Amino acid sequence: MDKLLIAGGIPLSGEVAISGAKNAALPLLCAALLTKEPVTFTNVPHLNDIGTMLKLLAQMGVKVSREAAVPAGTQSAGAGDTVTLDAAGLDNAVAPYEMVKTMRASILVLGPLVARAGEARVSLPGGCAIGARPVDQHIKGLTAMGAEINVEQGYVHARATRLKGARLFTDMVTVTGTENLMMAACLAQGETVIENAAREPEVVDLANCLIAMGARISGAGGDVIRIQGVEALHGATHRIMPDRIETGTYLCAAAATGGEVRLTGASATSLDAVIDKLMDTGCEIVAERDAIRLKAPRRLTAVSVRTAPYPAFPTDMQAQFMAINAVADGTAVMRETIFENRFMHAVELIRLGADIKIDGNTAFVKGVAKLDGATVMATDLRASASLVIAGLVAQGETLIERIYHLDRGYEGLEQKLAALGADIRRVK
Ligand code: UD1
């Protein structure tokens, strides 16, 4: 299994390109199931999760054409990022356990399949490292739209001749839940209203693509989304938004190492809460039209954060900020409100010398003057990113095990960090 070896202590400096957003791309690829016409996506990141989703769609009968990938960090990086999906021959509305267990976002095929094919059999995702993560809200919403749903032998089996528009209310704000129901509602009969909808920029990106495909959606980006169902959707071309979590991760890496970087192809508008906190640490940040520049102070100031649905501070940035706080001046209180078990990086950071105490969903992080390299283990995607940041800061060598999590969500991570001057390499 691959590992990452980092020799820390080098301030990151230079320019790097941000990739398309994983969490926007996954639902967008599923949206292609809603039409018989081809849909083309550009700025698709080269990630294992995207590969898994394309395999899942292909085994349903979707024709997948992808330009050959060009590795990040090479001169033509960014090319080869176009994917065309043609779901005219959709003939197998099944998402098997073997695929869903590797990627929870596979549940995003449920809404589109039942809306277009009248039937879907999708494996239940089960738990994951950061918590139970049920999909009851997805099921509740589709049931309210008239789908007949049975959960048997670990599969959600949904059927509907045609879904009917309904007034939907989710018990909590759910991102993929909102996306699943919004996609399903596009082909339903009549109007669907989703209340308590997720306001994440990825929901807006999906809505924009669906609108380009002929859907009638208003309100995406707010907490009430209205969808007037139509008979059919048509093909479109859509450019996937920049990855705001990848952007935030590189900003944190630059901040923690005392660096100065410019991230191109990035958007500051979807990152207000993160940029705000980084400015509180003492970083100078300048938002350009398609780029973000950051210059770190000599020592960062600790910042307290509380995760919550967008536009508040994202849970997907909590781990990276814990790495920052580990070496900042002062004590930070970090509260996780979205997932019940999302502090597993803390024990690994402690192995590097961090001073962190956990009490339920709150972490108290007292900044230390320095971290020392050690062997640590990645437990989930963003936890892995926090260990990379800590490794870049730590004195000596840090070896990160189980980095397959990083390959799910960070395109060309070591090439991009090396381009910013880091001493990082993949070892077998
Ligand atoms: C998405 C993101 C993930 C991010 C998360 C929260 C994708 C592919 N993934 O995950 O990176 O960390 O949003 O911002 O976009 N819940 C239920 N029942 C449901 C649905 C959700 O109880 O039916 C709970 C979850 O367990 C969790 C909370 O609601 O505690 C929010 O989860 P949700 O927004 O659904 O996360 P995902 O969409 O899976």
Image (tube, rainbow, N blue to C red):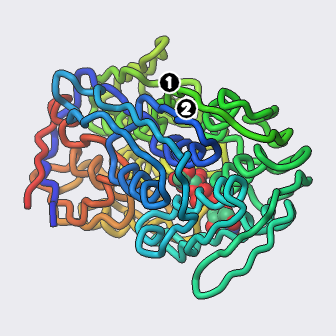
Can residue 226 be seen at all in this image of the molecule? Answer: no
Measured Cα–Cα span from mark 1 to mark 2? 7 Å
Which residue is found at the position 53% from the left and 51% from the top?
89
Farthest top residue in view: 289
Task: Answer with the quadrant where ligand 1 appears in the image.
Answer: bottom right
Q: Which residue is mark 2?
A: 271
Instruction: Please state if 408 lies on the left or on the right of 425 as rendered.
Output: right
Q: Quadrant of the C terminus?
A: bottom left
Q: Position of residue 125 (x, y in %)?
A: 54, 72
Identify residue type, mark 1.
Ser
Instruction: Please state if 324 lies on the left or on the right of 193 as rendered.
Output: left
Q: Position of residue 138 (x, y in %)?
A: 71, 63
Identify residue type, mark 2.
Leu
Classed neighbour count for the residue bearing mark 2: other residues with Cα under 10 Å, few (<14), some (14–19), many (≥20):
many
Q: Quadrant of residue 405?
A: bottom left
Contact, mark 1 vs mark 2 (Cβ under 8 Å): yes
Q: Which residue is mark 1?
A: 267
Which residue is found at the position 49% from the left and 11% from the top?
289
Q: Nearer the viewer, residue 353 or 200?
A: 200
Q: Quadrant of residue 412?
A: top left
